[in-house]
Image (tube, coloured by chain):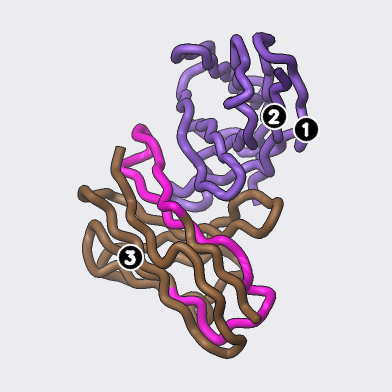
Amino acid sequence: QKEVEQNSGPLSVPEGAIASLNCTYSDRVSQSFFWYRQYSGKSPELIMSIYSNGDKEDGRFTAQLNKASQYVSLLIRDSQPSDSATYLCAVKNSNSGYALNFGKGTSLLVTP
Amino acid sequence: SAVISQKPSRDICQRGTSLTIQCQVDSQVTMMFWYRQQPGQSLTLIATANQGSEATYESGFVIDKFPISRPNLTFSTLTVSNMSPEDSSIYLCSSTRGSDYGYTFGSGTRLTVV
């Protein structure tokens, strides 16, 4: 089983701060990486996808990928209380066709 | 991204019965998947729903327990058979047009077996 590891948290940051979420993966040939946000009782919502080494920015969100070190991270700038949710890291698993393999998620709490 | 309509949104079922969950996508997609998410846990892949052929199941999941259909490119069903309380979970379908596109999720089915 190819693993995707995340710190379960909770990660608590004050409003306006930068939240940094990290993820490591074991499948060295993985090519596609995704960050999902999941509010309690809701289904996962795609925030970012990243396929190449380096940074990818979209609004307040920046995804960072380092394939050599097998980690992917998500930065949330100017964190808002509405960002409080569980953030799931997902990797396209080479052993399951095109299906995604998910980490356990990091719970983020943004305090006013 | 595709929009997925999933139903029912929740159900309470008696042990030993079966429940069929349906997902309808608003556009043609290449791949459809079924996941289970137990309380406080992440998503576990049950199977890949293959159009016009038998689903591909992950280790620990079998066709007799979780029969899946995908008669066309936009529709799939998952049946949870002979249910026990251990099957109480959220079941989610997902779809993609390819791994270079996003994967979207249905709203989920919260199943409680009593």
Question: Contact, CB < 8 Å: mark 1 with mark 2?
Answer: yes
Q: 10 Å neighbourhood of mark 2: few (<14), some, or many (≥20)?
A: many
Q: Nearer the viewer, residue A23 or A40?
A: A40
| Front disc: 3 or 1 | 1
- Label 3 CA crowd tier, 10 Å (few <14, some 14–19, many 20+): many
| Same subunit: marks 3 and 1 | no
Which subunit holds the residue at mark 2? A
Give, as a three-letter code, the residue at label 3. Answer: Ser
State the residue position of label 1: A10
Q: Which residues are magenta?
A: B79-107
- Choose top left, top right, bottom left or bottom right for residue A3: top right
Q: Is residue A30 left or right of residue A27?
A: left
Quickly name the residue at label 3: B76
Q: Colour of chain A?
A: purple
Chain B visual colour:
brown
Q: Is residue B23 above or below residue A28?
A: below
Front position in the image: A74 or A109: A109
Point out the image quarter for the C terminus of chain B: bottom right
Q: Secondary structure at mark 3?
A: strand
For numbered disc 2, what is the local secondary structure?
Answer: strand
Residue B20, placed above or below residue A44: below
- What's the residue at 64%, 37% (across, down)? A86
The amino acid marked with disc number 1 is Pro
Closest to the camera, between mark 3 and mark 2, is: 2
Chain assignment, label 1 = A
